[in-house]
């Protein structure tokens, strides 16, 4: 039986092989729970419903985990659905993961456009609520996350992190060409926060900023109290998409180096003094 039969009925009827410019494939995976390590080592597991990501951020470290150079070079234009993910998770019902710390997701976005069609991330959330009572952090840059507010509210311990990287649409369009605007992301995470869900805004990495003071105030106006920030190492940064030259030009235009980052950080910290930095900011809730 095709494991996609475990999805809800609407998803069964709509299994696209192409979504916009993104090629979609469906494959079984050996495991949906990956033992956390490295940057996420304080968690027990990570969950990634998909391989690849149609948001295609040019600087995304996950691209360098692609299984071949062709996949890496075409980052943003393919996604692989882990079609047996829910079946694998259901096998854990025999020994529920009470209190297990899970990060979703570390190398993809659980709410990228394909999830609007398949609702795989929503199905995973339902399973985690009903049988496992986990401590969950969800990382996304997609307004689609507002769809699942009803499920977020059923968790005893859950936080939704929204990535917001810049105040400039010029910068966003070069570094994150297929992503929703940062303005839309801020609106979405504010909606989630106002529903009563614990939220965090992650400036990871912080890309070139036009007006640091105004940017910090805009973030504070959401009412959210949790923030995380990381630098983008422009001198070491790798780019996988076709906007590499434009990205380097913008880095030069904004003078975005370690010194400039530190100057911007000082301004942001004045407004958000308790901001988390780097790995410590991502510690489990």
Image: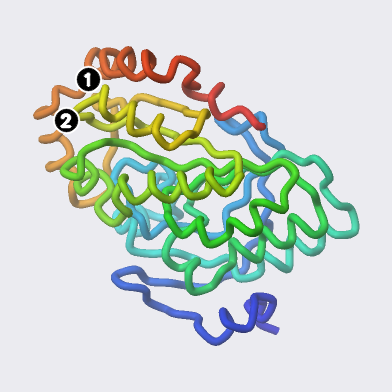
> Quarter of the image holding residue 234?
top left
Residue 104 position, x and y percent, is: 59, 48
In the displayed structure, does residue 135 sit left or right of residue 228?
right
Q: Position of residue 209 (x, y in %)?
A: 22, 29
Relative to 207, does residue 268 appear above or below in the rendering?
above
Say whether residue 275 is left or right of residue 210. Answer: right
Tell me how far mark 2 sits from mark 1, CA to CA. Answer: 8 Å
Q: Is residue 123 above or below residue 250?
A: below
Q: Is residue 279 above or below residue 190?
A: above
What mark, if any, has residue 251 been given in the picture?
2
Q: Is residue 23 above or below residue 169?
A: below
Which colour assignment does the render follow?
A: rainbow
The crowding category of the residue bearing disc 1, from other C-alpha atoms within 10 Å (few below 14, some 14 to 19, many at least 20), is: some
- Which labelled disc corresponds to residue 142? none
> Mark 1 sits on what residue?
257
Q: Secondary structure at mark 1?
A: loop
Q: Residue at x 58, y 30 (%)?
A: 38
Q: Earlier in the sequence, mark 2 or mark 1?
A: 2
| Crowd tier of the residue under label 2, counting other residues whose Cα lies within 10 Å: few below 14, some 14–19, many 20 or above | some
Residue 217 appears left or right of 89 = left
Where does the image place residue 40, in percent across and percent down from the top left? 59, 33
**Does residue 235 appear left or right of residue 57 in this picture?**
left
Which residue is nearer to you in this view: 71 or 182? 182
Q: Disc 2, disc 1: CB below 8 Å? A: yes
- Secondary-structure class at tag 2: helix
Question: Quarter-wise, where is residue 167 in the image?
Answer: top left
Residue beneath the point at 42% across and 65% down: 113
């Amino acid at each position: 039986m095709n494991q996609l039969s475990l999805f809800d009925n609407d998803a069964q009827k709509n299994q696209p092989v192409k979504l916009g410019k993104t090629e979609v494939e469906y494959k079984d995976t050996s495991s949906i729970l990956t033992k956390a390590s490295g940057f996420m080592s304080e968690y027990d597991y990570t969950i990634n419903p998909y391989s690849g990501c149609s948001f295609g951020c040019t600087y995304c470290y996950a691209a360098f985990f692609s299984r071949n150079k062709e996949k890496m070079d075409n980052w943003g234009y393919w996604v692989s659905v882990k079609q047996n993910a829910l079946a694998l998770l259901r096998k854990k019902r025999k020994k529920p993961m009470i209190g297990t710390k899970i990060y979703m997701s570390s190398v993809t976005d659980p709410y990228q456009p394909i999830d609007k069609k398949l609702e795989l991330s929503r199905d995973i959330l339902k399973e985690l609520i009903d049988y496992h009572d986990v401590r969950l952090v969800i990382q996304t840059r997609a307004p689609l996350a507002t769809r699942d507010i009803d499920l977020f509210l059923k968790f005893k311990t859950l936080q939704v992190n929204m990535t917001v990287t810049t105040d400039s649409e010029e910068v966003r369009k070069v570094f994150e060409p297929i992503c929703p605007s940062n303005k839309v992301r801020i609106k979405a995470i504010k909606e989630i926060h106002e529903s009563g869900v614990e939220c965090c805004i992650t400036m990871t990495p912080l890309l070139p900023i036009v007006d640091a003071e105004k940017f910090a105030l805009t973030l504070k106006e959401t009412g959210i109290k949790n923030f995380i920030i990381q630098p983008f190492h422009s001198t070491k940064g790798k780019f996988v998409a076709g906007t590499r030259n434009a990205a380097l030009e913008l880095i030069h235009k904004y003078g975005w180096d370690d010194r400039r980052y530190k100057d911007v950080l000082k301004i942001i910290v004045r407004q958000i003094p308790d901001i988390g930095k780097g790995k410590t900011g991502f510690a489990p809730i």
